[in-house]
């Protein structure tokens, strides 16, 4: 009945160095979860930030409108609350405030109980030369595997 929903942020690992990861719940409305179960969401341009009460929100997350809803549909780019333990929230808020790190959504999925979850990462931005080095390493690995494959045949 339930298919595997796995929406990834592919740019996150290229643009950021992920230092620590957490799994957070997402507060969603009725049409939002239905649209997410159809796989109509994107987190490629999104980020997380704290409000003045110390609550964590994901900003710029795109969940398309549900096709079978009436005029009670949700806003596609609404700010959505993330659910974490109080201890984890305080730790993340301290890291963001003191060291200037950022919180980036990595993956949105639906767990085995049917709840929407999001993997978030405490990240440090990469410099341009780090990105070039990542591309170079990836190309070298690809060429090496190609050579090994041709050598074995």
Image: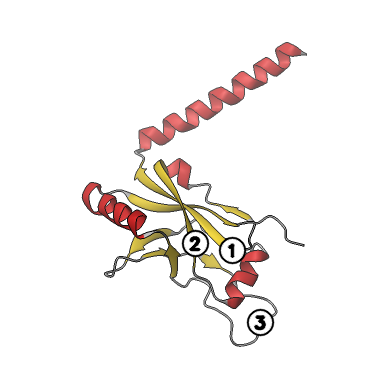
- Farthest residue to the left: give it: 98
Q: How far from the left and from the top, in percent, is residue 130?
A: 38, 33
User: Looking at the image, which is closer to me, 28 or 46?
Assistant: 28
Circle number at residue 124? none
Q: Residue furthest bottom?
A: 71
Which residue is under mark 1?
Answer: 115
> Pointers 1 and 3 in contact (CB under 8 A)?
no
Residue position marked by numbered label 3 in the rendering: 69
Q: How is the image coloured?
A: secondary structure
Contact between marks 1 and 2 (CB within 8 A): the answer is yes
| Neighbours of disc 3 within 10 Å: few (<14), some (14-19), many (20+) | few
Tag of residue 25: 2
- From the viewer's perspective, is residue 95 above or below residue 75? above
Q: Position of residue 104 (x, y in %)?
A: 42, 52
Give the label, 1 or 3, closer to the camera.
Answer: 1
Q: Quarter of the image containing the C terminus?
A: top right
User: Visible in this render: residue 85?
Assistant: yes
């Amino acid at each position: 009945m339930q298919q595997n929903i796995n929406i990834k942020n592919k740019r996150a690992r290229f643009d950021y160095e992920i230092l620590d990861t957490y799994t957070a719940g997402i507060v969603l409305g009725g049409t939002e979860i239905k649209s997410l179960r159809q796989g109509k969401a994107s987190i490629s341009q999104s980020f997380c930030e704290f409000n003045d009460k110390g609550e964590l929100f994901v900003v710029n997350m795109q969940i398309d409108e549900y096709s079978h809803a009436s005029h009670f549909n949700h806003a596609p780019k609404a700010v959505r609350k993330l659910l974490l333990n109080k201890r984890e929230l305080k730790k993340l808020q301290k890291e963001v405030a003191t060291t200037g790190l950022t919180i980036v959504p990595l993956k949105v999925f639906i767990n085995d109980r049917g709840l929407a979850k999001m993997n978030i990462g405490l990240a440090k931005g990469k410099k341009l030369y780090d990105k070039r080095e990542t591309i170079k390493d990836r190309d070298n690995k690809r060429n090496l595997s190609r050579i090994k494959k041709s050598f074995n045949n």
